Amino acid sequence: SIRSIKPNVDYIAVVYQVTSNFGNKGNPKLEKRMQHLVQMGLVDELHRFEPRNFEDEEKYAMCSPIATELGGPPTMVSNQFYNELFKREKGRQMCAAAGCTHFMSMDTDEYYKA
């Protein structure tokens, strides 16, 4: 996926985690692979994300008061949702800091044809 989009983008920031949102440990070679992608010039910046639990006040702060898509109040939504939201926002901030004017969030289980 990175190779297919690299010729068409100016900057690639990767927000990754070594422990899943459910506490499962990832591949022990992941961080070495991430560094290799930077050395190859396929990735410009990395950020290691640590999943966490969010307080109710934080959940309310991250959601629009008029949001209706959650299926209930923000406190009823799982921490996994907020971790994913937080990761996407971190990636957007990394790209903005690098001077990017546009941003696209992409997951590793999604494929793109340029």
Image: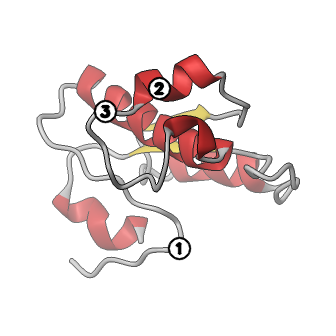
Determine crowd level at label 2: few under 14, some 14-19, many 20+ residues with C-alpha closer than 10 A: some
- Name the N-terminal-most of marks 1 and 2: 2
Q: Are marks 3 and 1 in contact (CB under 8 Å)?
A: no
Q: Residue furthest left?
A: 101
Q: Which mark is residue 60?
A: 2
- Name the N-terminal-most of marks 3 and 1: 3
Residue 73 image point, x, y percent: 49, 40
Residue 62 image point, x, y percent: 42, 28
Residue 71 appears in the picture as rendered: yes
Position of 96 with respect to 85 (left or right) is left
Q: Which mark is residue 64?
A: 3
Q: Mark 3: which amino acid?
A: Ser
Residue 104 image point, x, y percent: 26, 52
Q: Which mark is residue 1?
A: none
Residue with the mark numbered 1:
109
Q: Residue at x 30, y 43 (%)?
A: 67
Position of 54 with respect to 8 (left or right) is right
Residue 39 appears in the picture as rendered: no
Residue 34 image point, x, y percent: 62, 49
Q: Residue at x 35, y 53 (%)?
A: 105
Q: Are marks 3 and 2 in contact (CB under 8 Å)?
A: no
The image quarter containing residue 6 is bottom left
- Mark 2 residue element: helix
